[in-house]
Image (spheres, rainbow, N blue to C red):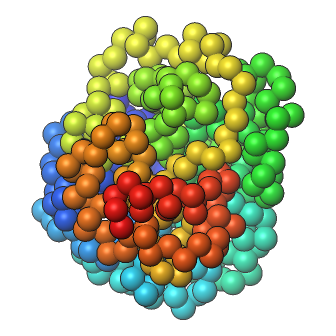
Amino acid sequence: MEYRELGNTGLRASVIGMGCEGFSEDNYAMTARMFDKAQALGINYFDLYASDPALRAAVGKALRGRRDQFLIQSHICSVWQNGQYLRTRDPEQTKAGFEEMMRLLDTDYLDVGMIHYCDAMHDWEAIVQNGILDYARELKAQGRIRHIGLSSHNPLVAERAVVEGGIEVLMFSVNPCYDLQPADEDVEQLWNDDAYAADLTNMDPDRQRLYETCQRRGVGITVMKAFAGGDLLHAELSPAGVALTANQCIAYALSRPAVSVVLAGAHTVEQLEQSAAYCDADAEARDYAAALASFPKIHWEGHCMYCSHCAPCPVQISVADVTKFLHLAQAQGQMPETVREHYAVLPHHAGECIRCGACEKRCPFGVAIRENMAQAAALFGY
């Protein structure tokens, strides 16, 4: 395993980290298996954005006896309410959610306390004005979090937070397609054709400036969505129309200024091993330049990244999970048994969709969610 300093935090992190997407697989039994494999591979960093109490408890159990072997990046303002995830800026909800998280993780401190999901300027202002940033600073002063972080997809918002808010670690979406997208609070502008008129290897200047600002200020970047939810690994799913390898995506992300860790959203032990294999890959396997040069014109609209920004659903459908299982089945051209069984144990299914469209209004990628729910209901039968 390779390691890098995480900005100026003094933390030395593995360049491959774990996302928490797969922890709930197999009725949360996957959590312990992932941590066992991570420790064997030398992976010492993981992100926990999910607020599911059962998942957090599984992580706490997996950490017992080896808390000092891992660096925890976990999220403030990601809470559990009425049986599903909620992003909050309410101080009391935030504080209660933090206390519950610490109890379930069975730890006295987080290495990075990550203020959760801020993509709009007015949202950053709410974080400041509502006392969320002050609360994070209080937690740091108490030693309950060692460093303050922020997660974002918007380079302008992220840069403002880094410059004004004393953010020490930034969790940001980095891949060779996202880096072409202009910053805008109007998400529709992400798919404006004018944004892709230049050569596709030209990075959006706001993103370039963000990475350089972080590098200059000693802010470490931990990368989410390095594979764009897995789509970049498949030509038929990739918005670029060209498949990249996991090694190429990881190498690209790690070549951006200030990037320290790529969080691999593995759903199986084997997928985690594949990401960790990057450290043994030669220069040819890591090279992404030729692939980038072959990219045709890119259109982003309609690609679900399973980010869960569509939540909360009025009837508590986990839209991201349903869409994921729909895509897995469609990609296989048949109904894999594991996909069918995982869909079956969801508490709510696509057939319960009331077609209100609230999810589509929140989706950052313009996904036709109601259509996806109809397809899933027809495919799975309920």
Q: Is residue 377 above or below residue 35?
A: below
**Residue 327 coordinates in the image, percent (x, y):** 43, 46
**Residue 313 coordinates in the image, percent (x, y):** 52, 76
Residue pictured at 37% horizontal, 44% vertical: 328
Residue pictured at 57% horizontal, 10% vertical: 290
Residue pictured at 38% horizontal, 54% vertical: 379
Q: Looking at the rendering, in which quadrant would you find the N terminus?
A: top left
The mark total stands at 0
> Residue 278 sits in which quadrant?
top left
Between 246 and 286, the one lying in front of the other is 246
Between 61 and 4, the one lying in front of the other is 61
Q: Is residue 2 above or below residue 22?
A: above
**Residue 196 coordinates in the image, percent (x, y):** 79, 30
Between 193 and 76, the one lying in front of the other is 193
> Residue 268 sits in which quadrant?
top left
* Left or right of 180 on screen, residue 320: left
Between 16 and 218, the one lying in front of the other is 16
List the single residue furthest toward the left. Answer: 65
List the single residue furthest toward the right. Answer: 194
> Residue 115 sits in which quadrant?
bottom right
- Inspect this view and state whether residue 276 appears: no
* Left or right of 209 on screen, residue 64: left
List the single residue furthest toward the bottom. Answer: 92
- Inspect this view and state whether residue 94 appears: yes
Q: Looking at the rendering, in which quadrant would you find the C terminus?
A: bottom left
Q: Is residue 353 above or below residue 120?
A: below
Residue pictured at 69% horizontal, 60% vertical: 119
